[in-house]
Amino acid sequence: MDQADAKPVRTLLVSDVHLGCKHSQSKEFLNFLQGFAPENIYLVGDFIDGWKINTGWHWTQDCDNVISHLIELTRRGTKVFYVPGNHDAFLRSSVLRSALPDEFSRVEVANEFVFETLAGWRFLVTHGDLFDCVEMQAQWLSKGTSALYDACLSLNWWLHRYTFAESCNPYGVCAVLKDRVKRSIRFISNFESKILDHARLRDCDGIVCGHIHTPDIVTTDSMWYCNTGDWVENCTGLVECHDGQIQLVRRYDEDIILDLPARQSPDHPLPIAIDPGLVLTEPGFSSAPNFEAAAKEFAV
């Protein structure tokens, strides 16, 4: 798509692209990115799938194209903010971040950001893995079931190839199954309540997270819960338009719209890094970074 045809928007928030995983729908993600000219982009964790480095690393030309497009956006003035997740947790280490290609230096990295909407509402942006009892107490279980789930994704892909139309979601069956499993985990771990309580402690009006691959916008009595979804099973992302409307754009379903009323709020900078020690601000993009080589360097 010609950049001149891209829709100007204020903010994009996406998560769980899982570049490096063979099931990442990176081409669909690139098409999504090319459809917008954003002022800000939040990569809300698991953008790169570091878990696959030693168990099925799959870096394609589409992955390179995604990185190149992001770099081109930064050259045109787009600000990029990166919140690490459990699959790219190496970015939480200042030592490992220092070994990344120079092209990554314009991206700000922090465990949490606060972003203020056009209407003045404050949303805490974090991946969500730090509020998942399985990830925090038994990550071996999460990693152990990953291989089984990959097999299910592969089976779903082959089933789709010979049974369903090309326009249908190639991982639709897995999306339904994972949604049911994740809903059970959310109930057991009280995921949404814990993450909303944390946002409230940060003096925020809502949360934007990913992690559980379950895109949604939920309005409670006092706060908003927004999950960006993923680019494996669902192909979804949050878009803040210049009129203040927030859309959960869904490739295989109808969009969800959140119309936020105007609000008087203190004059906060946009965005605010909660842990400024994890912010990278040195200038200097030059060409597409070799994330494949960088990620393999971090393999344990």
Image: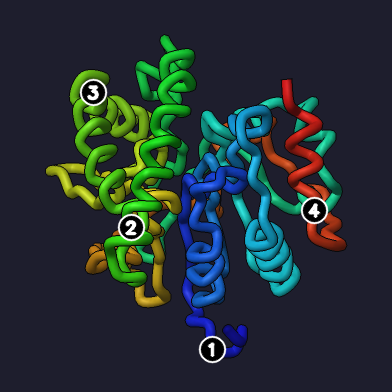
> Foreground mark, 2 or 1?
2
The amino acid marked with disc number 4 is Pro
Determine which residue is flagged by label 3.
190
Determine which residue is flagged by label 2.
160
* Callout 4–callout 1 Cβ contact below 8 Å: no
Marks counted in the figure total: 4
> Foreground mark, 2 or 3?
2
Label 3 to label 4: alpha-carbon separation: 38 Å
Query: Which badge, 2 or 4, is on the more N-terminal residue?
Result: 2
Q: Residues within 10 Å of mark 2 (few under 14, many from 20)?
A: some
Q: Nearer the viewer, residue 21 or 254?
A: 21
Q: Which mark is residue 289?
A: 4
Query: Which badge, 3 or 4, is on the more N-terminal residue?
Result: 3
* Callout 2–callout 1 Cβ contact below 8 Å: no
Q: Residues within 10 Å of mark 3 (few under 14, many from 20)?
A: some
> Foreground mark, 3 or 4?
4
Against 164, residue 138 (above or below) is: above
Identify the element where label 2 is drawn.
Answer: helix
**Picture residue at 82% right of the left edge, 34% below the top:** 98
The amino acid marked with disc number 1 is Asp
Label 4 to label 1: alpha-carbon separation: 26 Å
Is 70 left or right of 155, judged from the image as shown?
right
The amino acid marked with disc number 2 is His
* Callout 2–callout 3 Cβ contact below 8 Å: no
Identify the element where label 3 is drawn.
Answer: loop
